[in-house]
Image (tube, rainbow, N blue to C red):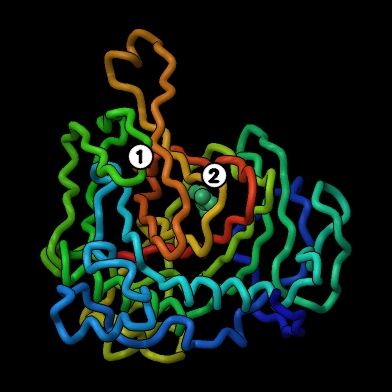
Amino acid sequence: MAKKRKNKFSGSTAEQLPSTTTTTTKRSSFESFPLYLVPNDNYSSSSSSDNSNKNYQDYDNGVSNSKSRELHEYVKGRVWVIPSFFSPKECQAWIDFCESFSDSDGDTNRSTSGGGGGGGDDDGGGFQYTAHPASNYIANRECYRMQETNGRELSDRIFKRLQGMTMATKGMIHCGDGDASDVNNNNNNDNNHIHKHNSNIQQETADLYRNEYKPINCNPNLRVYRYNKGHAFGRHVDGSNVVTGYKGDSGDNGNGSATSTSTRTRTTTCKTEMTMLLYLSTCEGGATRFHLPSSKRNRKKNNINNNSIAYSPQVGSLLLHVHGNHCLEHEADVVLSGKKYVLRTDLIYG
Ligand SMILES: O=C(O)CCC(=O)C(=O)O
Ligand SMILES: [Fe+2]
């Protein structure tokens, strides 16, 4: 069990929470986050006979194979998974770090309303309880959150690892224009299947740098969620955000701090295009469920569409999904037992 530790706060909460949100106003910080939790090396997905595989000695305890460090398409043109992005040890270290700011019952910074019990800790940092009912504009949500709005070094490292894995396998993810309504479902909820869809979307994974518009980093706005039993996040779509500080000219990252590992050679407007969900634990329930748009025929007939594809959290797996205009509606199913920990960032394109 992680011990309680004091933390200093910094940064600001970038994610806008509605006025009905029940949450504390304090900010948590990852400023003391140990960088070794995401080693600054380039993880390549090579065959097991390759020497570079020793990078993984501590990474997967020999359990996973190189395929589990590759990008797999989960919903065509919309959702991808890398089954072993973080090692189990790394996941546990993230959880321990985040929980080290909690009260012994794990309810640090708990506000007064809502379920779950526990009292607040006014200078502890760490997880903050977030809960709001559904309204016309926002989905219902209940979980704990911890946030660092400028975790630049960590996001650089996460991106470097993603590059190492995707470059060695199927290339970086190309994000093109498409119409989400053209995605169809084969109604198979099994995590082990790649879901095939008829689609006119020109959105296949593409080799890194084949296209001008490509992934350049991960969002330094890092969030860790903890869903306890009964917690969930209702049906919603994720918005795309313009991100500053990634101009890439002559090492200028726009904010005077360290140069990004993904320095570019031209000035560009950068936007988040994909949500990245890094599952740090497994639990019963708690799947991330994508709702597939109904076919044009069903829409005409006004048929109700209940097609969905759920991804159950696996320790260390990374799920990426297109967000913004082409985001599939999705939700986090209720956690039935255990705790679901997720690290959320986004893939920035420019
Ligand atoms: O926790 C999940 O499974 C989904 C989280 C999510 O949808 C989000 O962060 O926008
Ligand atoms: Fe979402």
Q: With respect to residue 302, does 125 lie above or below?
A: below
Q: Quadrant of residue 291?
A: top left
Q: Nearer the viewer, residue 70 or 198?
A: 70
- Which mark is drawn over residue 190? 1
Q: Nearer the viewer, residue 338 or 302?
A: 338
Q: With respect to residue 278, does 19 lie above or below?
A: above
Give the x, y percent position of residue 226.
63, 59
Give the x, y percent position of residue 78.
30, 45
Q: Quadrant of residue 294?
A: top left
- Which mark is drawn over residue 222? none
Assign the C terminus to one quadrant of the image.
Answer: bottom left
Q: CA distance from mark 2 to mark 1?
A: 16 Å
Give the residue type at disc 1: Asp
What residue did someone put label 2 on?
332
Ligand 1 within 8 Å of the CB at mark 2: yes
Give the residue at x 37% y 89%: 259
Q: Determine the secondary structure under disc 1.
A: loop
Q: Nearer the viewer, residue 193 or 271?
A: 193
Give the x, y percent position of residue 311.
42, 45
Give the residue type at disc 2: Ala
Badge 2: how crowded within 10 Å, few (<14), some, or many (20+)? Answer: many
Give the residue at x 48% y 76%: 89
Q: Is residue 228 left or right of residue 160?
A: right
Q: Quadrant of residue 160?
A: bottom left
Ligand 1 within 8 Å of the CB at mark 1: no
Give the residue at x 25% y 67%: 65
Give the x, y percent position of residue 128.
73, 63
Disc on the earlier residue, 2 or 1: 1
Identity of the residue furthest to the top in this view: 301
Nearer the camera: disc 2 or disc 1: 1
Circles 2 and 1: CB distance less than 8 Å? no
Q: Nearer the viewer, residue 266 or 25?
A: 25
